[in-house]
Every structure is written in C-alpha cells, then in structure tokens.
Image (spheres, rainbow, N blue to C red):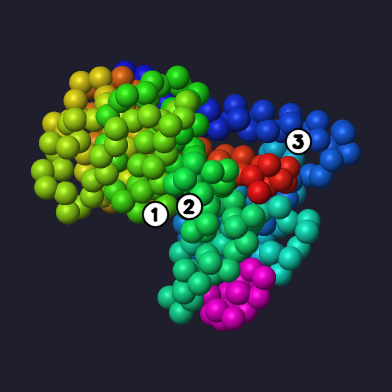
C-alpha cells in the first residue's frame, strides 16, 4: 500500500508555480490575480478562504479578499460579481459557498463570467468539460486527476467507480475519467445513495472515488484487493479523547481499507490540499489567457 500524499504533492506544485510566476515577473509579464468573495461567518468557509489567500502569497500571486456580512442582499452580491467580471486586473475569482439562505447560489454562479470562473462551476465550463474542450475544471476533480497523473497510476482500460453524484465532485469525476485522454479511458460506474447493492458495485472498482459525505461509509468488504482508493470526504466525528473534542475522518474507514489498497489518499492531507492548488493552476491559466 502506498499513500497518495496530497499535502506533499501540493507543496511540489506550489514550488513549480512560484518559479513560473517569478519568471513571469522578471520578464515583465502580468502577475496572476485571484479574488475571493466571502459572505458571512461560516467557520469552514473562513478556513478555506484563508488557505486560498495564503497559498496565493506562497506562489507570488496577487490576492484580493472581499468580505461581506451574512445579511448582504442578493442584489449587492450580484453587483460585486459584476464589478469583478469587469475588472481587467482580476484574472479569476471565486464566491465561496455555501451562501446564506436568502441568496440563490445558482443565480450567483450564473452571473460569473465563465472566463473568470476558476472554480469551474459555471455550466459553460462544465459543458465544455463534458465535450473535451478547453475549460476550467472544477478544483477538486482537477486535483484528483493531478494526483493520479503525478503518482503514475494507470487508468487506461480500468474500471472506475465513483460514489456520489454531486456537480462539484462526483459527476465531473465520472466524465473526466471516461474521457479519451492520458489520464482517462476508464469504464466508469457512477453510484449514489439510491444505487442497489452499492457495496457490490464498489467491489468491482480498480479505481474507487468516494465523495458521498458520510463518515467512514466505505469499509474493507466494499473494496477489492489492489484497488486505488481516493477519499474526498471530510467529516467531523465527535471524539472525547481528541484535543478539540472531535476528529476529522473521510468517507472511507481508512485503517481497515488501506491494507487492501495499492494506493490510497489519507484524510486529512489527501485531496484537500490539492483542491486549493488546482484553483491556483486555473488562475495561472486565466492570467495567460490559454483557456478562452
């Protein structure tokens, strides 16, 4: 069994990005600029955005953080999006989700210029992805594809099973793994909470992507010997023995599944760090104008 160390890989890619950005600056080129919009006081969102801003600093990007109170109106937030769309110095931006209940997330997503949608959530980018056209890939699936490539995990002709069908992870992963590409050419089964005998489907997987949002859902009896397992989950589980009163766990019961795997991602330190790194990669592409 070999760990797919997302934290170490993210550090490696950030170093590569920092070197490229330094060369761009020396040549008199434009410094990539990422903006983030944070609404409200959601603790997890604040951590995510803080990590993104810090990552920008580490690679030499310019970053802008726009913070608004939770009671900001939908109209005001749409105006912020419009202003960012029109700001020539901003290469890409994100509006951190989730948003307060009175704001329609779909409306905000649709208002973002696809050319600046470095989160890869706009339907135009998702549609271009489905057709194999240049686009900004959703950050988490992009990160997973990078992990598979950098760890030289063979995907050609393999059977991939994806557990979870969200538009953020599961569905894009199923499309990317099936595409005719260096990392792709899988036969893909997309499963979810309504799948009959989900355990049997999971056992067929050479590559198992788990993004169902249920702590330790996948157990050893659901994984075949030698499988590659990518755990996208991040769940807080109460644990009185832990310093903070809880521990972080994925959607896979790591201790019992890991011995059966050829490769597996840990939680934390697996997919999470690569999600932020993928956002940086998309922003660099945006600054170069190589996608649109």
Numbered range of the magenta stretch: 67-82
Q: Position of residue 136 (x, y in %)?
A: 56, 47
- Which dot, 3 or 1, sits closer to the camera? 1
Find disc 1 in the rendering and name its residue. 167
The answer to whether mark 2 and mark 1 are in CB contact below 8 A is: yes
- What distance separates the C-alpha of mark 2 from that of mark 1? 9 Å
- Nearest the eye: 278 or 256: 278
Which residue does the image show at 62% across and 62% down from the upper left?
113
Q: Position of residue 112 (x, y in %)?
A: 60, 64
Classify 69 as above or below 144. Answer: below
The alpha-carbon separation of the residues under discs 3 and 1 comes to: 31 Å
Answer left or right for 113 relative to 177: right
Q: Secondary structure at mark 1?
A: loop
Mark before the other along the chain sequence, 2 or 3: 3
Query: Given contact means CB atoms under 8 Å apart, are the residues at marks 3 and 1 in contact?
Result: no
- For the point 41% across and 36% down, which residue is it? 179
The quarter of the picture where residue 218 lies is top left
Residue holding disc 3: 21
Residue 67's quadrant in the figure? Answer: bottom right
Compared with residue 45, is residue 9 higher up or lower down, i.e. above or below?
above
Residue 130 rendering spot, x and y as whole percentages: 44, 47
Dot 2 alpha-carbon crowd within 10 angstroms: few under 14, some 14 to 19, many 20 or more: many
Q: 141 or 129: nearer the eye?
A: 129
Image point (52%, 65%), residue name: 109
């Amino acid at each position: 069994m070999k760990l797919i160390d997302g934290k170490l890989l993210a550090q490696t890619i950030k170093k590569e990005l920092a070197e490229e950005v330094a060369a761009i600056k020396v040549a008199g080129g434009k410094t990539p600029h990422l903006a983030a919009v944070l609404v409200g006081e959601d603790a997890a969102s604040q951590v995510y955005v803080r990590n993104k801003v810090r990552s920008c600093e580490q690679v030499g990007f310019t970053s802008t953080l726009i913070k608004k109170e939770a009671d900001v109106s939908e109209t005001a937030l749409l105006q912020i999006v419009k202003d960012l769309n029109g700001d020539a110095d901003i290469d890409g931006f994100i509006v951190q989700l989730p948003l307060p209940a009175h704001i329609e997330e779909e409306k905000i997503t649709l208002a973002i210029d696809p050319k600046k949608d470095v989160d890869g959530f706009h339907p135009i980018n998702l549609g271009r992805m489905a057709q194999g056209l240049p686009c900004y890939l959703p950050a988490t699936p992009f990160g997973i594809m990078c992990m598979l490539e950098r760890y030289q995990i063979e995907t050609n002709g393999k059977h991939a099973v994806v557990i979870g069908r969200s538009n953020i992870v599961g569905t894009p992963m199923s499309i990317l793994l099936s595409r005719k590409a260096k990392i792709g050419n899988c036969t893909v089964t997309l499963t979810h909470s309504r799948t009959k005998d989900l355990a049997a489907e999971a056992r067929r997987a050479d590559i198992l992507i788990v993004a169902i949002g249920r702590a330790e859902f996948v157990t050893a009896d659901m994984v075949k010997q030698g499988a590659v397992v990518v755990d996208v989950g991040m769940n807080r589980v109460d644990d009185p023995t832990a310093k903070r009163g809880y521990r972080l766990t994925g959607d896979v019961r790591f201790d019992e599944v890991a011995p059966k795997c050829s490769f597996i991602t840990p939680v934390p330190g697996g997919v999470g760090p690569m999600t932020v790194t993928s956002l940086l990669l998309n922003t660099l592409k945006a600054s170069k104008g190589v996608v649109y």
